[in-house]
């Protein structure tokens, strides 16, 4: 623990929590805090509060009193024991409450109760079951007269960990290593500082993000935050995990949270249309949006997937055939796998370029509906290999991390004359791409499309061109690290 404390201080941590309940054997408080490299919070959590301490209350309270006697900067006390550990010296008191099941409806009442316990800082940490829990928690932090750290746990609660300082919290919590998470949804110190630049967030920081469910696979926060950092923009880009049933509520509350723009991905690209006040031409034609801009009380929908995918495909085919990219897809026969948001965008773009397309999806009705909308052909998923196509497009999530051993198309049906494009970017070399290369197909990976559409989104967010080379480098490094 001493070694990790010193390491974190060397990295720039200004306050480190020492969890005595994680020490096997009898904790030596004096040894832990003597010559400490930076200020500390001392806590010792019982199992009922999400900790590991199981050796009785009197020994635990003695450790906390000892820490105060040693003059530590902060001691963390639960509500029921705050009165048993008196104030002494310069040690400040964090009075805390944890709820690992939910975010209670009566947050204000709980906060008022904790405020009466001689608190220097109030900490409320609850489980987020709905995206709206983040907004309720952050509003509590903003309106509190006592310095308050308000955090929601779980994947849904990640935004609250990053934004609590913007709303007025004196600090937030991170784990010392991403493989040693001490609470659900906790980010590492490295992620908080290097990806989200937490120390630079202030009340003027503009909020952007990606809306998805699940959210863990998305590399959008990595590349957009890197771009904001390079261009020295006071903006942060967050992962918003929003279940299908909560999308409408989230979109209604996003502006109040301070959101200026969103990337939209699986499974919300189509459902989000109901919450938009204005659609660009591509969104109207495709029936799906991947970008939302909040402006003047309205929600404006855009789709950068189509142009990005088509530019990637045209460039690759034109280079192979030494032709004009504008003519690369004319009269090309294409099979599009997937009739969801990505499949719709690519099929729409292909048709506009003069290609002859066939669409298919595991949900046959979905494929038929798209074919009717675009006036093209559809086939049953089981018959996809019977379509003779010059271009094979995967617009499904099949093969996406962590399911990297799956492919949406049987390898023995691939022909060397085919061009194979997989929109999945994580990993870049999906099983489909590997098998297509093995059969001498011309391949196009999803990374190029992803970077192009991200740059287009960045322009919609900021009015400036996105740094494509930086974004591409960040993606390649991240996906390479994931394979190690």
Image (cartoon, rainbow, N blue to C red):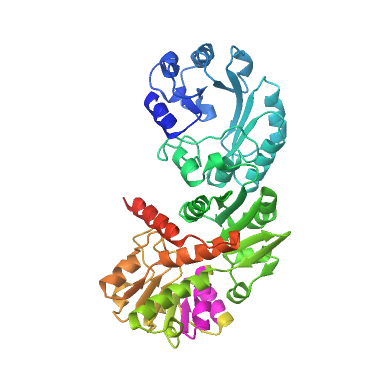
Q: Check if residue 144 falls in the magenta segment.
A: no
Q: x, y percentage for residue 464?
A: 56, 61
Tell which residue pokes out farthest to the bottom in this image.
331
Q: Main secondary structure of the magenta part?
A: helix
Give the residues drawn in magenta, as a range: 342-371
Q: Is residue 96 above or below residue 429?
A: above
Query: Is any part of residue 131 visible from this angle?
Result: yes
Residue at image coords 69%, 40%: 139
Residue at image coords 40%, 40%: 179
The residue lying toward the viewer, choosing from 56 and 340, is: 340
Q: x, y percentage for residue 467?
A: 48, 60
The residue lying toward the viewer, choosing from 317 and 48, is: 317
Number of marks in picture? 0
Q: Name the quarter where the N terminus is drawn.
A: top left
Q: Is residue 201 above or below residue 36?
A: below
Query: Is any part of residue 339 visible from this angle?
Result: no
Q: x, y percentage for residue 446?
A: 41, 66
Q: Is residue 127 above or below residue 439?
A: above
Q: Quadrant of residue 82?
A: top right
Q: x, y percentage for residue 142?
A: 69, 38
- The answer to whether 372 appears left or right of 168 in the picture is left
Q: Check if residue 367 falls in the magenta segment.
A: yes
Q: Is residue 356 above or below residue 463?
A: below
């Amino acid at each position: 623990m001493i070694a990790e404390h010193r390491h974190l201080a060397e990295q720039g941590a200004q306050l480190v929590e020492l969890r005595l309940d994680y020490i096997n054997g009898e904790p030596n408080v004096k040894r832990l805090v003597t010559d400490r490299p930076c200020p500390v919070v001392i806590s010792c959590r019982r199992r009922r509060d999400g900790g590991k301490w199981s050796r009785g209350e009197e020994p635990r309270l003695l450790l906390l009193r000892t820490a105060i006697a040693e003059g530590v900067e902060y001691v963390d006390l639960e509500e029921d024991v705050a009165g048993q550990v008196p104030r002494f010296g310069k040690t400040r008191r964090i009075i805390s409450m944890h709820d690992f099941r939910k975010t209670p409806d009566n947050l204000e009442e709980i906060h008022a109760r904790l405020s009466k316990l001689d608190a220097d800082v109030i900490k409320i940490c609850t489980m987020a079951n709905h995206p709206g829990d983040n907004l309720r928690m952050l509003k509590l932090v903003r309106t509190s007269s006592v310095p308050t750290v308000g955090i929601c746990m779980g994947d849904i609660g990640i935004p609250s960990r990053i934004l609590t300082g913007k709303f007025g919290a004196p600090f937030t919590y991170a784990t010392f290593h991403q493989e040693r998470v001490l609470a659900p949804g906790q980010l590492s110190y490295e992620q908080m500082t290097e990806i989200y630049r937490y120390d630079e967030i202030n009340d003027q920081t503009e909020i952007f993000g990606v809306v998805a469910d699940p959210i863990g696979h998305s590399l959008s926060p990595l590349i957009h935050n890197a771009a904001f950092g390079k261009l020295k923009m006071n903006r942060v880009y967050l992962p918003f995990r929003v279940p299908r049933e909560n999308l409408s509520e989230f979109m209604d509350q996003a502006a109040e949270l301070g959101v200026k723009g969103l990337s939209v991905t699986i499974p919300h690209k189509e459902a989000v249309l109901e919450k938009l006040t204005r659609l660009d031409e591509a969104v109207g034609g495709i029936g799906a949006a991947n970008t939302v801009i909040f402006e003047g009380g309205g929600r404006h929908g855009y789709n950068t997937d189509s142009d990005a995918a088509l530019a990637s495909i045209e460039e690759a085919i034109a280079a192979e055939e030494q032709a004009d990219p504008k003519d690369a897809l004319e009269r090309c026969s294409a099979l599009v796998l997937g009739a969801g948001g990505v499949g719709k965008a690519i099929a729409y773009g292909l048709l506009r370029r003069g290609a002859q397309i066939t669409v298919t999806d595991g949900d046959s009705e979905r494929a038929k509906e798209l074919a009717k909308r675009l006036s093209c052909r559809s086939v049953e998923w089981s018959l996809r290999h019977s379509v003779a196509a010059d271009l094979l497009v995967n617009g499904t999530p099949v093969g996406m991390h962590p399911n990297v051993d799956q492919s949406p198309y049987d390898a023995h049906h691939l022909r060397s004359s085919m061009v194979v494009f997989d929109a999945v970017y994580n990993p870049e070399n999906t099983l489909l791409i590997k098998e297509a290369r093995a059969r001498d197909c011309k391949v196009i990976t999803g990374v190029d499309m992803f970077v192009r559409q991200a740059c287009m989104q960045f322009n919609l967010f900021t009015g400036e061109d996105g740094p494509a080379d930086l974004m591409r480098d960040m993606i390649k490094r991240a996906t390479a690290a994931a394979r190690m």
